[in-house]
Image (cartoon, rainbow, N blue to C red):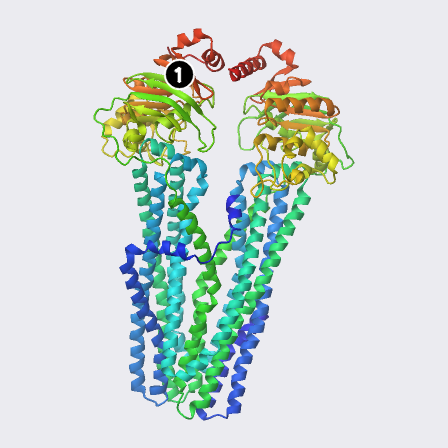
Amino acid sequence: MNTFHEEEIMGKAYDSRLMKRLLTYMKPYRWQVVLAVLLMLVATALDLLMPYLTKIALDNYIIPHDAQGLLHIVWLFIWVLVFQFFFQISQAYLLQWIGQKVLYDLRIKLFRHMQRLSLSFFDKNPVGRLVTRVTTDVETLNELFSAGIVAIFGDIFLLAGIIIVLLKINSTLALITFSVLPVLFYITIVFRKYVREGFRQIRVRIAKINAYLQENISGMLIVQLFNREKKNFKKFDVLNADHLEAYIRTIVYFAIFFPAVELISAIAVALIVWYGGMNFNSGAVTIGTLVAFIQYARRFFRPISDLSEKYNILQAAMASSERIFKILDTVPDIKNPEAPWEVINFRGHIEFDHVWFSYKKDEEDWVLRDVSFQVLPGEKIAFVGATGAGKTTIISLLCRFYDVQRGSITIDGVDIREYDIHFLRSHFGIVLQDVFLFAGDIETNIRLSNTAMPREQIIKAAKDVNLDPFIRQLPNQYQEEVKERGSTLSMGQRQLLSFARALASNPHILILDEATSSVDTETELLIQDALKTLMEGRTSIIIAHRLSTIVNSDRILVMHKGKIRETGTHRELLTQKGIYHRLYQLQYKGENQVSS
Amino acid sequence: MFILGSNVFYAISPRVLKLTIDKIEAGIEPRTLLMYCSLLVAIAFGHLIFRFFMRTTMISASRKIEYDIRNDYFSHLLTLPISFYHNYKTGDLMARATNDLNAVRNVVGPGIMHSTSNIMMFVFVIALMAYTSFKLTLFALIPLPLITLVSKLTMKHIYATFKKAQEQYSTITAKVQENISGVRVVKAYVQEDRETQIFSTLNDRYLELNLKLTKIRSVLFASISLFMGIALAVLIWVGGKLVMTNTISVGDFVAFTVWLGMLAWPLISFGWILNMIQQGAASLTRIAEILDIPPAIRDNELTDKSIRAISGEIEFRDVSFRFPNTDADTLRHINLKIPHGTTLAVVGHTGSGKSTFANLIPRLFEPTDGHLLIDGRDIISIPLKTLRKHIGMVPQETFLFSDTIAENISFGVDTFNGAELEAAASLSTIAHDLDKFPDKYETLLGERGITLSGGQKQRTALSRAIIRKPSILILDDAFSSVDSNTEEQILHQFRDMLTDQTIIIVAHRISTIMHADHIIVLDDGEIIEQGTHNELLAMNGFYARLFEKQRLEADLETL
């Protein structure tokens, strides 16, 4: 719904602050810009030469009947055309090249910046909105660079060039020609004022229509259940008619404006002819001059006609760049320490010390309350608890997706905020509940960025987690493409793949959020078996949903309402008859205990 | 007609120019000169008038057509069944009403206007040129077909490259989408650099395609100027010689240069307009695709128009239901009679068919097999409007409109007074919350208003159903976000006030349904247990287990 409402917010057409910042992206290409401007100057000059050559042809050769001279001038004309052809191509290409390069840089910069932002940023911004920033908004700027800036530069050169040439040929006639300009400017200004207001109205009204339509499509069930079809149609019709009316008004503006510009141009031509005719006998004005003037006058009026279009491009570009810069200006919450702790011997002794945490920074809406526990190197810990007890939060904090508000988390006695984030995370093998697959083949999904990882290691990891037999059945085996929502792999196989991914990276500490989705018994057995391999000889922190996983762990931490309420082994906790006992009855009792 | 007039005036002005120049050359009286100049302006003015009417009539017509299509589209959407909305995404339906509609309008307005105008201008200008000098026309026009040829050739190329670039753009979009959705994994496995690397590679290709596109375009535009220039060069050469031999006058020569300029634009825009028409045709097909879907559920010859009211007895006779394009029944052989004025509760796992069961009653879906009877009459004989008028339903997903709360509550009634509004609001206990808002019932909801909590939304939706004073009240998981104390209070009020209504409650919580007159347990589309709360507990089956589980959960909550 957002997109349709955003339309309504009308930004300024020109914001010097935003423009300046946009132009800084052209800095790496400043020499190309200079070259492009030079090329453009030459191309414009050549373009302007042509009516002048026509004038010479008429005055010096055609009228005096000099066929030889005419041939010369025609050849010269053709040469100018050929040069013009090449200059125009190189100029247009170079300018577009600069624009495309700038957008390329901006897109990469934006993407790279987003990679650095913290999870809290992604929690706040819906995926769709962020995708729009990197794609649609950058594309809007494309229009600005290719159509807007280029065209504006070109027009300015052209106008200036025409003015100079006309003054040179015949200054009186030039001044007479320019005499219509104030009228033209006046009409343009008035027109722009009306059209701007007209367009604003149109935008507001189309936004209303689309918002209403979208709402009705989303709520169609309610509309039909409550017999509102007629009433809502009437409402829609009113909005639709409003929009129509606003549009028809602007059509009138346009219908007056464009022909009016032509009328003024015709008046200019008439003035030229009149003055020329009056002064023809005295020889002050030649036929060639008249023709040249008429041709120049036509070129002169052309850029003014598409003024309103450029205005729209500029406006859209300003709005987009503002949104892009807003993201670029977002500072990541989680910062890498400037002088990270130099690690000599990473053992993996984890300690949570009186940790308090809330997802809302300023509110005391505690998800974890005063949580303290230790995990010794090599220990296997299982977290259990009802949904919302705070188990996943523990993992997120340990990976430093978020920072704690109170207390501290240390590994080998050093606060995790003092480690290099990437160093820290590279010691964890993290398996999240939803298995996320990247577009690409199976091998790449196991290997990820570790291009140095030998093929054998990947295959061994797949074998160890019982995934290999499945892969062998695929047509392209390890090179089989997987898609995010594709059906190449089943739910259970996806889980196994995520195990293989974790195992291949050979982490010190295994962090696992067990998937709750149910799989068939056969796969279930394979998963349980793979889990054992995965945990072997590793410090493991597991949010457990399987009884077998719980029973196989060294210690169970029972979380309830953001606190650790009970600790012990399965047997110990059952005899306590506390929270664990109830959870056990609720969740695990009667579960098919297929192993141990 | 306007187009014709406009073009006649436009094409003729160089002719007047010619006469003037010839006269000037021959020596002219200032008065005659002034007359000719005025004529030039007058012609331009005539052109303006016709142009004005051409634009206003053609473009306005296209806007009116847009208006009509949009209205047709919306009114058609209103008649389509809910199952249609499961198959089409909102974004897709919106795209048809926005992008596609624009493309269609562009064809009927500017498309037709420019193409007819261009063709006419072409014909007039060439006719006038040929009239002035056939030979010169022939020579000057030689390079022009090349323009059309080149633009046609490159257009194909441009189109193909453009399509590739668009595809690459989609790939980039998909990559960003994937990256952001998988941000946890990206961070957990320290994949940021690799992701940026992949993203760069995709962008390299995009850049490459765009530059290729630019190259073709620059060549195209430059070639067009080149050919136009060559035409002008030919004109100067051949025309110049003709002037020298006195075959044509200097004025003719000047007029030719102007006419040549007039021909440039129609030639260039030809390919562009063709492209626009193609797009418009494709878009029209997409809009028509929706308009051609017949409304599946509506009154027909079996409808008995004399039925004006329903009292609320419901009977399922061997009802089965299957969603289109699926291979298993969602509901299987349901046989059940719900007497007037009683409360039926439905429990079961997610996906057991509870909502489908509820949706059959207001005919949002129609049974694939069996019959559904209301007051002993087959549901298809009851006029759809009458049926729904007497049903108050709170669907699973609460949907409120961005309007005031009063508007939302009174959504389904034609007339109401303040007392009825307040009664409905207090019965669903939302009245108490509304009193805390400064604008009370006039509080605006949605983007530009306030956001209600999930429970408040559900209770507003409840008021919306109650204010209709329905014979049948259907609550499809309507208390999921309401806390159990409030729920208790609402249900208590219902038992006191809504004694004449047939109530269907679909719920997860046992506390919601335990007081119902009759409870059915659905599993995989079948009724596996039924009876009163106590009877079901005694069966010691699904219901009893569910009860025990929820007791434990409640117990845990207190720890």
Q: Is residue A431 visible?
A: no
**Mark count:** 1
Q: Is residue B218 visible?
A: yes
Quadrant for the N terminus of chain B in the image: bottom right
Which corner quadrant of the image does residue B357 belong to? Answer: top right
Instruction: Note whether B209 is above or below A438 in the view shown.
Output: below
Q: Nearer the viewer, residue B483 or B316?
A: B483
Q: Nearer the viewer, residue B138 or B347?
A: B347
The residue positioned 39% from the left and 79% from the top of the image is A166
Crowd class of label 1 (few under 14; some 14 to 19; many from 20; radius 10 Å): many
Q: Position of residue B277 (x, y in %)?
A: 50, 58
Q: Position of residue A351 (x, y in %)?
A: 33, 21
Which corner quadrant of the image does residue B497 belong to? Answer: top right
Q: Assign a secondary structure to mark 1.
A: strand
Q: Position of residue A342 (x, y in %)?
A: 23, 30
Q: Which residue type carries mark 1?
A: Leu
Which corner quadrant of the image does residue B329 belong to? Answer: top right
Instruction: Note whether B140 is above or below B217 in the view shown.
Output: below
